[in-house]
Amino acid sequence: MAVTPPDKRIWWNEPIERVELVWIVIAFLWGLFMFFFMIAWHFIGQQNLSSEAYRIAPSAFEEKVDAFAKKHQVREEKGIPVAKPPAGSDVYILGRLWQWWPILELEKGQSYRIHLSSIDWQHGFSLQPTNINIQVHPGYEHVISLTPTQSGEFGIICNEFCGIGHHTMIGKIYVTEPKKAEAGQRLADGGKQ
Amino acid sequence: MTAETVIGAVGAKAEFRTCQYTGLKVDAAAQKLIIANAVAAVVFLLLGGVMGLLVALTRWPAVHLLPADWFYLVLTGHGANVLLFWIIFFEMAILYFASAVLLNSRLAAPKLAWLGFLLMIAGAVMGNVAVLQGESSVMFTSYPPMMARPHFYLSIILFAVGALIGCGIFFATLVIAKEERTYEGSIPLVTFGALTAAIIAVFTIASGAVILIPTMLWSMGLISDIDPLLYKVVWWGMGHSSQQINVSAHVSIWYLTAALLIGAKPLSEKVSRTAFLMYILFLQLASAHHLLAEPGLDASWKIVNTSYMMYLAVMGSMVHGLTVPGAIEAAQRRNGFNRGMFEWLRKAPWGHPAFSAMFLSLVFFGFIGGISGVVLGTEQLNVLMHNTIYVPGHFHGTVVAGTTLAFMGATYLVLPLIFQREILWPKLAKMQPYLFGIGAAGISLFMMGAGTLGVARRHWDITFSDANLSFAHSAGAFLMMGLNGIFAIIAAVGGAIYVVVVVGTVLFGEKIKGGHKLTFPLHAGGGAVASHYGSEKTPKLPGTIILVTIFFVCFVLYYFINWKYLSELWLFR
C-alpha cells in the first residue's frame, strides 16, 4: 500500500490540493490582517509604546531624578520621597539595585511624561496589577506619556533579572481621584477616540 | 570538482548495513555519530530537567525550595542545558540521520564530525562548570551590563563552533550523496526540512559569534563597554533564530514519524517545501520579538520584524499545521480507516510512543506555543506580557511540549533502528509521551495564566517578603504558580521515565537481529515514503478541515481577547 515508488514528476510542477490552497489563502489573509491591525492601533488605539528615547549617562539621569524628587516631594515613605508632580509635567523614575525611585503620586485622567532609565543593570518596569511591562536600559532615557485610568495604589515590580535582590525591587505609584470634573471629562473623551 | 576533492576521501570506503525495516542503507560512521549525539543529548536533558524541576518547585509559593542564589544559578543552568545542549545534540543526530541515512549515503568526513562532537561536549561541560561555580548566574540570555566569568561565554562559543562543524558535515554529505547518486531526483522532504534547520543554524551561530566574542572580551576586561540594546538585537539573532532551528527540526520529525508509522506522504511536496522556505526567508526577523518593550526603536521597524514580514513565517507553520495531520489522514484513509470524520484519528497508532509524542507535539505546538507566540509577538500586545512568566509559558509550549516531545518520540524510532535495541519496558514507554506532554502543556498554560496576572519571570519570591515596600499579587496568581508546580512534577515524571527507558534500552535492551518483530512496529514500506519525494493523490480530508477550523477559531478569539485586555490598560503613547 504505502510502498510507493518515487514519483518521477518534478515536485514544483505538481498541482496544489484545493484544501491546501484554501488554507494558505486564509493564513495569508489572516497574517495581513494582523499586520495591518498593528499599524491601525497606532491610529485607533490608546496604548502604543513611545519610541521617544535619548542616550544619557547614568550619572546625568540620576541628577535629573534627584532634582525632580527634591522639587516635588510632598512626604516620605520608608525613607523614599513621594513626589507629586503637576499634570502634564515631566516625571522621572529611576531603576537601580534594588528599588524604583522615587514614589509617585499622580492624578487619574491626567497625562504625564514619564522618563524611565536605569543607572546600573537592566531592569523591567512592571506596573501591577495593571500589567504594563517596559524594559529599562542603562544609558537610554525612555519617555512615555502615561495617563492613569484607575485610582488607587499600584506596585512597580522588577521583571528583568537584576541579581540576588531582584525580588525585593519594588516601587509605588499612587493615583488619586481627579479634583476637577473636567479631568474625568477629558478621560471619557480620550476613551472614545 | 568532485565531492572527494571538496571534502577529502576520508569516508570513501564507508561500511554500510541495510536496515531490515526500512530498506535504508546505514553508514556505520553515521550510525556511531548519531548514537553519540543522542546519548549526549539525553545526559544533558537529565541534568537540565532536574534543574527545571528545582526551578518549578522554588516558584511554587507553598514549597519555595531553593534559596535565592541557588535558584538563579539553577535557572541559568536549566536554560543552557535543555535549550542549548539537549536540543542541539539531538539536532546533530537528526542532521546526520536526515543526510547520510535517509539519502543512503556515506557521511562526509566522520573524523571532523567527531571533532565537532568533542567541541560541543567540551563547551557543554565547561558551561555547566562555569554556572555551578556560581559567578555566572546571569541567566541564559546573559544581558550586559550584568557580567559572567569569561569561560561562561567561551563555553557557548565552543559549543557553537562544534555545532557549526556538524552543519558543515551535513551540507557536505548532501553534496556527496548528490555526486555519488545515492538517491534520485530531489532530496526527500524530511531532509529538506533538516536542510532548512541547518541553514538557519549557520545564521544563528554567526549571530552568536558576533555578539558573544566581544562580550567575552568585555568580561576579560579587554573591551570597556557593551551596549545593552545592541547586545539584545544581535544576541536574539541567535537566541530566537535558534528556536526556528528547533521548529524546522521538529516539523521534519513530524513528517518523518508520519511517514515511518503510517506511510504518510505530504499532500503536495511543493506546499510543504515552500512552507519550510518561509522559515529560511523570514524567521530571522524574530529578534524583534524581544525588543518590543525597549526604548528607542521605531514602531515601523518593530511591526515589520516582529511579524516576520507580514506573518509569512507564521503562514509557513500554519501550512505545516494542515499538511501534517492532512498527510496522516490521507494515509490512514488509504490504510482502510475510512469511516466517518475521525476513524483515521481514533485508529491511529496511539499505543506507539513515537506516534503519540508526535501528534501531541503537533497539537501543543500549534495551540499553545504557536498562538501564544503570535500574541506575544504583536507590537502593542507585548506590553501586556513582556518579561512576565507568560514568556516562559509560551516557550515551554514551543520548545518543551513541541520540540522536546517530538524529539522524545523520535527516540522511540532511533532506539530500534539506529541503536538496534528493542525498547525495554514498552508499557512505560507507551505512557511516557502522555505524561510528559500533559505535564509540559500544563506548565505552559499555567505560566501563561500567571503571567497574564502579572507574575514576573526569573523571580525568586512573588510574595516580596524581604522588600522595603510591599506588593501583593492576586490569589489567582498564587494558584497558577502552584498548579505550575504540580504539572512540573508530572512532566518530570514523564521525563524521568524517558531517561530510564532510553538508558535501560541502550544498556540492556535485546539486540535486534534479522527477522526480529518490533514491539512498536513501523508501517510496511514507511522507509520508502520517508526517503523518497512524492505527493499524496487528491484525498478528501474532512477530519483535518475540522481540526484546522477549531485551531483557527481559537487563534482569532485569543488574539482579540488580548486586544480587549490591552484596551483596558492605562493610556500611553
Image (tube, rainbow, N blue to C red):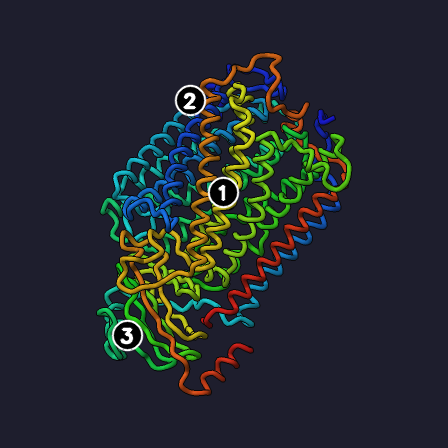
* Point 43% across, 51% down: residue: B481
Query: Where is residue B338, by image quadrant?
Result: top right
Q: Residue at x 45, y 87 (%)?
A: A181
Please identify the quarter of the rendering in which residue B456 is found: bottom left
The structure residue drawn at horizontal position 66% and vertical position 57%, both measured from the top left corner, is A29
Ranked by sequence position, the earlier of labels 2 and 1 is 2
- Residue located farthest toward the bottom when viewing the structure as drawn: A181
Mark 3 lies on residue: A82
Give the residue number, with chain letter if any, for mark 2.
B111
The relative height of residue B474 versus residue B279 in the rendered view (above or below) is below
Q: Nearer the viewer, residue B260 or B546?
A: B546
Residue drawn 63% across the image and 19% down it: B23
Q: Position of residue A8 (x, y in %)?
A: 72, 30
- Label 3 lies in what chain? A
The reply to whether residue B211 is visible in this rendering is no
The chain holding disc 2 is B
Give the structural element (helix, strand or loop) at label 3: strand
